[in-house]
Amino acid sequence: MVDGEAHAALEKRLAEFFNSPIALIFNSGYDANVGFFSCVPQPEDVIVYDEYLHASVHDWMKASRVEKTRRIPFKNNSVDNLRRVPLGVRKMLKEKSAEPGGDTSSVFVSVEALYSMDGTIAPLTAICDALEELFPAGNAYLIVDEAHSAGIYGHQGRGQVAQLALEHRVLVRLVTFGKALGATGAVLLTNELIRDYLIHHARPFMFTTSLSNSNIIAADASFDLLMDGTGERQSARMHRESEEVDGAWKGTTYWRQLCTVQPDGQE
């Protein structure tokens, strides 16, 4: 048994905190990723994704109803490469629009705000601009995974999307509780239509036990720390120490050797 009121209260709080129409809590970021992409994209849709996306993304793509030829990667954080990808996508959609009934396809573009393995940050504003320019009909939707950026970027740890004031230009944000927040679970920040669809069709949401009341309380307490300024002080310290380590690392002989480009065939 779970306390539904506690879950609903936290979802309401998170929607307000992240300036989102609505929020839906999942047991983990993995479940949220698989849940969304295994049921929301339809067979005629297209998924465009950054090549460095998390392993869960590749799992949900396999589970989705979108065929492999309509799942297209682009080079990590390369807006130029992303701009070239939609040329083929628009050709697909144009061919579809010639069929009876026209085209109602959507293009879902999936990125991470911060890529954990390389520590690179996605150019979210430039990506939004490119999608709005290339798809003026408004049928391209950005999904941003903030698993590694929430809690350490933006005012009170609201993440990169909020820091750049892109809340209304991003269809879905994923925030996990298990990284900077030190708790368990995740939340999808989206609109009411998608939330209701996920509740009735996302298998990782439907066929599992909900987070326990203690998990919800722990996550709620983490957001208390974000809102009272504790999180910002800790993240500021983390950024300072990261810069110190980065500076020290770049002064090593190993770093200089790593960055030295050797001609082919030479060591």
Image (tube, helix red, strand yellow):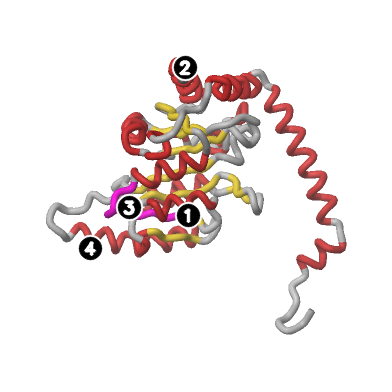
Q: Which residue is mark 1?
A: 58
**Residue 236 among magenta residues:** no
Q: Position of residue 109 (x, y in %)?
A: 42, 50
Q: Few, some or many C-alpha atoms within 10 Å of disc 4 (few <14, some 14-19, many ≥20)?
A: few
Q: Earlier in the sequence, mark 2 or mark 4?
A: 2
In the visual, does 57 lie left or right of 193?
Answer: right
Q: Position of residue 231 (x, y in %)?
A: 68, 26
In the visual, does 3 lie left or right of 113?
Answer: left
**Residue 149, above or below 247:** above
Gap between marks 2 and 4 measured at Cα = 50 Å
Gap between marks 3 and 4 measured at Cα = 19 Å
Q: Which residue is mark 2?
A: 3
Q: Position of residue 208 (x, y in %)?
A: 44, 34
Q: Tell me which residue sits at (42%, 45%) in the image.
A: 142
Q: Position of residue 72 (x, y in %)?
A: 41, 60
Q: Which residue is mark 4?
A: 95
**Residue 45 among magenta residues:** yes
Q: Which residue is mark 3?
A: 65
Residue numbers of the magenta segment: 41-49
Q: Few, some or many C-alpha atoms within 10 Å of disc 3 (few <14, some 14-19, many ≥20)?
A: some
Specify the amino acid type for callout 2.
Asp
Q: Tell me which residue sits at (44%, 28%) in the image.
A: 23
Specify the quadrant of the image occupied by residue 113. top right
